[in-house]
Image: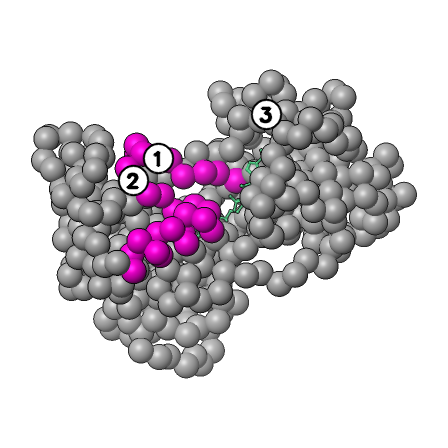
Amino acid sequence: MSAAQTPGMHRVVVVGNGIAGQTACDSLRTAGFDGELTVVGDEPVPAYSRPALSKALLTDGGSHELAAPAHGATELLGVAAVGLGVAARTVRLDDGRDLPFDGLVIATGTRARRLGQDALVLRTLDDALLLRDRLAARPSVAVVGAGPLGMEVASAAVQAGCEVTVVADTAPMRPQFGGYLSEVFTTAATAAGVKIVYGTAAGVDAGAVTLDDGTRVTAELVVAAIGDIPNVEWLQDSGLLTDGRLVADTRGRVAPGIVAAGDVAHLPVRGIVRRIPLWNSAIEQARVAAVALLRGDDAPEFDADPYFWTEQFGLHLKAIGHLPVDGDPTFLAGEDPHGPALLHWRHPDGAGVAVAINHRIPIPRLRRAAATGQLPGTVTTSG
Ligand SMILES: Cc1cc2nc3c(=O)[nH]c(=O)nc-3n(C[C@H](O)[C@H](O)[C@H](O)COP(=O)(O)OP(=O)(O)OC[C@H]3O[C@@H](n4cnc5c(N)ncnc54)[C@H](O)[C@@H]3O)c2cc1C
């Protein structure tokens, strides 16, 4: 499809230069959009792999770079969108310019929730480089928050030779993974020397985290990994927010000619309107939203089972399907959940979840395993 085949769609502006924004640009071109494409990003650097920030980049300096874009968009980097005129069809930039558009993709992601000035966070490349520098001095570290991000940071800090305490308000990653996998990863973390202190952090001052029962966890470096906040402030006066949330339909549409994708967007998933703040979900959402911008109801809906991975404490987990999962799994391969193993759960509604731990099963096969509950074909395993 060319721009001429999409009536009135000559200029598309993409706000947010993360993976959702970049994928939207690629997908618009793949779908035949040959009009004017502009991507606006407030970070002054080209898009990069955010997941790498808490993995390769922190541990061995591995690459966070993405392949150079081929979509030919005009990239306005180091520039923030500060307002949206829905009726006027313009995006207001912080340098005073108004960018006109016929179609708009909102992909502004999220930022880290902070816990005072004395705790580092990890969301951006700058955050990661600062954290890596600080870890190099091998300080004692307290990580507040025991979700996947907090536990990856704890793992990297252990690898850097630091003494690490995790402040957890519930069992590590239990809300995200469910009890079984939480226990597998908690065992690995404690075996690696991580101390877990249960409680809720009330504040951080130089040298300690104070819990709400008054306990103080002393540490030379505190990292807060306590969630993220969608970047929607620039949409405040747009009329697009519902109770402060940007809610899209199953094709990413939020208003005529306006779509949203990635961490910033709420959308209906299995009957619940929520965000899926995962890398591959951002990619899938952006693909769907870009096509919906051009083709409306003829675009496919977003229905992909999410793919998620994490690397920590010697465990490399890949999961297809909706986590968390309840109860014990069926082992499709292996016997020890610390791997190599391939585990399967089935939700009460019939949806399958397959999890590979230190297992080299390719993603398409893992996807089939999730759906069928069987090990598809022959696979090679590795420790
Ligand atoms: C350290 C870390 C590790 C992770 N690891 C994993 C993992 O292992 N597996 C996994 O599935 N997911 C992981 N994630 C989540 C994954 O990275 C995100 O789901 C994904 O990056 C979301 O992409 P996005 O494009 O929607 O948002 P973002 O990556 O947040 O990109 C949005 C961009 O928009 C910019 N922006 C914001 N406001 C404005 C504005 N007003 N004007 C212009 N630009 C703006 C932001 O600065 C940012 O550059 C991780 C996240 C982090 C932080």
How crowded is the residue under tag 1: few (<14 C-alpha within 10 Å), some, or many (20+)? some
Residue at the image point whose x is 45% and y is 59% from the top: 52
* Mark 1: secondary structure: loop
Residue 167 drawn at (x, y percent):
20, 44
Q: CA distance from mark 1 to mark 3?
A: 22 Å
Magenta segment includes 134: yes
Residue in the picture at 41% in, 47% down: 127
Q: For mark 3, what is the residue?
A: 235
Give the amino acid type for the residue marked by disc 1 in the picture. Arg
Of residues 333 and 12, which is closer to you in this image?
Answer: 12
Left or right, 162 with respect to 82, comes to left
Q: Position of residue 141 (x, y in %)?
A: 21, 51
Q: Of helix, strand and loop, which one carries label 3? A: helix
The label on residue 119 is 2
Q: Which residues are magenta?
A: 109-136
Residue topped by disc 1: 114
Label 3 neighbour load within 10 Å: few <14, some 14-19, many 20+: many
Label 3 lies in ligand 1 vicinity (Cβ under 8 Å): no
Q: Residue furthest right?
A: 4
The kind of residue tagged 3 is: Leu
How far apart in space, not on screen, are marks 1 and 2 (Cα)? 8 Å
Query: Given contact means CB atoms under 8 Å apart, are the residues at marks 1 and 2 in contact?
Result: yes
